Amino acid sequence: MIQGLESWGLLVLRVALGAAFVIHGYPKIGSRREDIIDFMRTKGIPGPITLITGYFEFFGGLLMIIGLGVQIIGLLMALESVMTIFVSSKLLRKKYSQGYEIDIAYFAMALALFLLGAGSISVDSYLIPLL
């Protein structure tokens, strides 16, 4: 019934995940950078790791939205999500509900994009045939 809409589904998935990563990354590299770095230091995470994560989340999210390097970015986002699940559950002692359930959803979305690719509505779809 809705056959042929796979690329639209991948676009929705990419934009939702990319926007979430941009929103999570911006405070780590923007005006709240020092506050967030200081907080993460109290949890045992070095400042440079927080900063690198912020840049990856922000710029990786933008790349995901436009559909450039989706499988590589998806794999990296999935790996970061595994680390975030660990940090949320162990270091921040959050519970599944109202804690790290969103990180599990991000992991699943990123893994799906790693496995499926960007779809035809993406920069990747124009570049990959050229490679």
Image (cartoon, rainbow, N blue to C red):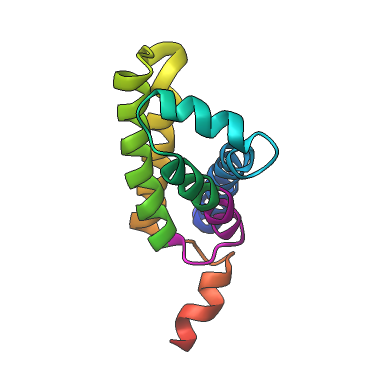
Q: Quadrant of residue 65?
A: bottom right
Magenta stretch: helix, strand or loop mostly: helix
- Residue 52 vertical position relative to residue 129 in the rendered view, above or below: above
Q: Position of residue 81 (x, y in %)?
A: 37, 38
Region rendered in magenta: 58-70
Residue located 41% across and 48% down the image: 77
Up-down: is 96 above or below 43? above
Depth order, front residue of 46/82: 46
Using the image as rendered, state which of residue 27 and residue 43 is in the foreground: 43
The percent position of residue 121, horizontal first and vertical second, equals 59, 64
* Residue 118: x %, y % from top left: 48, 61
Residue 12, visible in the rendered structure: yes
Determine if the magenta segment contains residue 110.
no
Relative depth, front residue between 66 and 21 = 21
**In this view of the protein, which residue sits in the foreground, 102 or 51?**
51
Q: Residue 63 colored magenta?
A: yes
* Quadrant for the C terminus in the image: bottom left
Residue at figure coordinates x 61%, y 38% from the top left: 33
